[in-house]
Amino acid sequence: MTTPPLFDGFDGLDEAGAGPRPRVTVAPGAVHVPDWLSLERQRELVTACRGWATGPVPMRHTRLPGGGVMSVRTVCVGWHWQPYRYTRTAADAGGARVAEFPDWLAELGRRALVAAYQDPAAGDGYDPDTALVNFYDGRATMGMHQDRDERSRAPVVSLSIGDSCVFRFGNTENRGRPYTDVELRSGDLFVFGGPSRLAYHGVPRVRPGTGNPATGLAGGRLNITLRVTGLTGTPAARRR
Ligand SMILES: O=C(O)CCC(=O)C(=O)O
Ligand SMILES: [Fe+2]
């Protein structure tokens, strides 16, 4: 029996409906954990992201120094990323200080590492302090890049909600091959750390209409990456 299209992307079954999609180590330190987030957790994250998207810093298309504009819309929590650095205030998006990074999100990050690396101690000491929340409409893509503006080389935890996408996970040398195309669906976790921490990656395609409105997201794709900036700020500095 094939999977009814209505359930594609959130029933935990593979394309043929034959069973759960397996956890896959795509490269050393890079792990895909399908269906890691419960529907309820996805709903909570959608609600949280809606809140962050409305302020204090608005969700916006990031402008690149070369004059280009990213097709995804982004809002940051904890630290604000703009190409190619982190600051506490969003100079390129209204100037407000970004929302505090909540403890529950750091805890989710620790649990993500335990699940991805299948090691109860994998989350020990992991203390993400920034989240980049990206929203992709059906036409948005993200070119191949490295996440390298963080001083820390602690793993990146990536959570996906809504429409499925092709996530291209490459090598640490250049934007080209070899790379692996992974389908990320609503609820999937992807972690990249260790030898894969600086691997090039991108999103060449989103598949409109494959999400589940029960997540609270009627359309589009939400991706949240948790990272450790390695930057410090005293409470006073944090307000700057
Ligand atoms: O949307 C994704 O899955 C990846 C996002 C990403 O690479 C980034 O925000 O740096
Ligand atoms: Fe990235």
Image: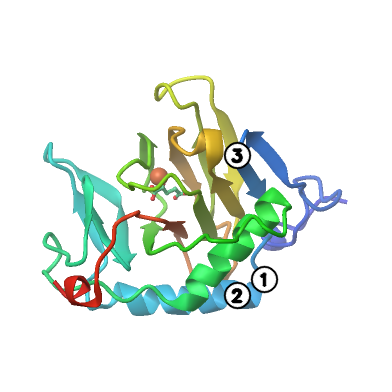
User: Which type of secondary structure does the marked residue at label 2 adopt?
Assistant: helix
Residues at discs 3 and 1 in contact (Cβ within 8 Å): no
Q: Give the residue at x 47% y 77%.
A: 103
Horizontal and vertical percent position of residue 187: 61, 62
Q: Is 132 displayed left or right of 223 in the figure?
A: left
Residue 217 visible to an observer of this rendering: no
When the figure is inspected, residue 95 is found, relative to residue 200, above or below; the finding is: below
**Which amino acid type corresponds to the residue marked 2 in the rendered image?**
Arg
Label 3, on which residue?
Answer: 29
**Which amino acid type corresponds to the residue marked 1 in the rendered image?**
Ser
User: Which type of secondary structure does the marked residue at label 1 adopt?
Assistant: loop
Label 1, label 2: how many angstroms apart (C-alpha)?
Answer: 5 Å
Label 2, on which residue?
Answer: 41
- Label 3 neighbourhood size at 10 Å, few (<14), some (14-19), many (20+)? some
Which mark, by number, is residue 38?
1
Q: Earlier in the sequence, mark 3 or mark 1?
A: 3
**Which amino acid type corresponds to the residue marked 3 in the rendered image?**
Gly
